[in-house]
Image (cartoon, grey):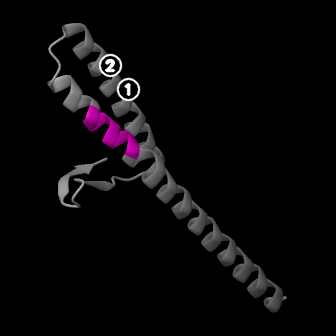
Amino acid sequence: MLNYQNKLRAMASKLMMSEERERRHIATGLHDEILQPLVFLKLKIEHLKKNQTDGKLQKEFAQMVKLLINLIDIGDAQLGKKNNLCLTNEDGRIQKEYSL
């Protein structure tokens, strides 16, 4: 009976570790493949908006930025934690650090 309980505990422990690895894998994919590009897109749109003189286009850009912020917030909530994101220039220097 004791041997059976020990085997059950070991199996439960392996299952929990496997689930945790899968959670980390999903969180990394969400951050790297979805949230980082969304933040980069948000920054590009903000840059375009800042350099745009047409009021109608500025409003369109503002709406896009709001949508992207909502998507980033949803992704962040799914991760359950804050993630730091560093964006680099073409030459590899860090442009800015953002918290998601």
Q: Residue at x 19, y 10 (%)?
A: 54
Q: Which residues are magenta?
A: 37-44
Which of the 4 quarters of the picture holds residue 4?
Answer: bottom right
Does 66 appear above or below 6? above
Q: Which residue is mark 2?
A: 63
Amino acid type at image mark 2: Gln
Which of the 4 quarters of the picture holds residue 59?
Answer: top left
Q: Residue at x 55, y 56 (%)?
A: 26
User: Which one is in front, 93 or 75?
Assistant: 93
- Give the Cα distance between marks 1 and 2: 6 Å
Does 49 appear above or below 37? above
Q: Are marks 1 and 2 in contact (CB under 8 Å)?
A: yes
**How many neighbours does mark 2 have within 10 angstroms: few (below 14), some (14-19), or many (20 or more)?**
few
Query: Quadrant of the image for the N terminus?
Result: bottom right
* Image location (x, y in percent) of residue 25: 55, 62
User: Which one is in front, 10 or 68?
Assistant: 68
Q: Residue at x 26, y 13 (%)?
A: 57
Q: Give the structural element (helix, strand or loop) at label 1.
A: helix
* Image location (x, y in percent) of residue 15: 69, 71
Which label was assigned to residue 67?
Answer: 1
